[in-house]
Image (tube, grey):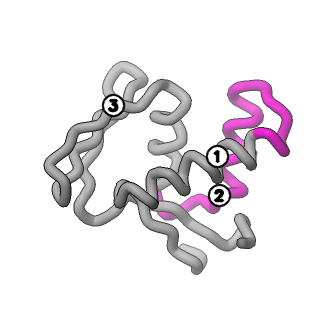
Amino acid sequence: MNISQIYPKPHPQTAGRVIDGEAVLILADSSEIQVLNPVGSRIFELADGQRSIADISQIIAQEYDVAPANARADVLEFLQQLVDKNVMVFVESSP
């Protein structure tokens, strides 16, 4: 997977809002509500379909002062979990 060409964005059936640094997500398909921690909320906020996974990883590495390789691995793993739960989708084209 080339993370420079993958653009994550919310699943069409997901509604979310960041409140006081925490994302509150409503998953219409499963009638669930999920609350993300501050780092997960920031990733969710950045995953708007306009930034690639590589872009998001770079921002997270800078904002949270972590090694770029660690940020890439963690962001990819987190986004994949959200895709698996139908919270996010991956789009393989530039915006």
Question: Distance between the Cα atoms at labels 1 and 2?
Answer: 7 Å
Give the residue displayed 49% in from the left and 25% down from the top: 38
Residue 6 at x, y percent in the picture: 62, 69
Question: Distance between the Cα atoms at labels 3 and 2?
Answer: 21 Å
Give the residue displayed 49% in from the left and 63% down from the top: 49
Residues 84 and 61: in front is 84
Q: Secondary structure at mark 1?
A: helix
| Residue 12 falls left or right of residue 5 | left
Residue 10 at x, y percent in the picture: 38, 58
Q: Which residue is mark 2?
A: 53
Q: Tag 2: residue type?
A: Ile
Q: Which residue is mark 1?
A: 75
The image quarter containing residue 13 is bottom left
Contact, CB < 8 Å: mark 1 with mark 2?
A: yes
Contact, CB < 8 Å: mark 3 with mark 1?
A: no
Q: Which residue is mark 3?
A: 35
Give the residue displayed 44% in from the left and 66% down from the top: 89
Vertical placement of 7 versus 42: above or below? below
- Residue numbers of the magenta segment: 48-70
Residues 74 and 15: in front is 74
Q: Secondary structure at mark 2?
A: helix
| Residue 43 falls left or right of residue 57 | left
Q: Tag 1: residue type?
A: Val
Q: Quadrant of the N terminus?
A: bottom right
Vertical placement of 4 versus 64: above or below? below
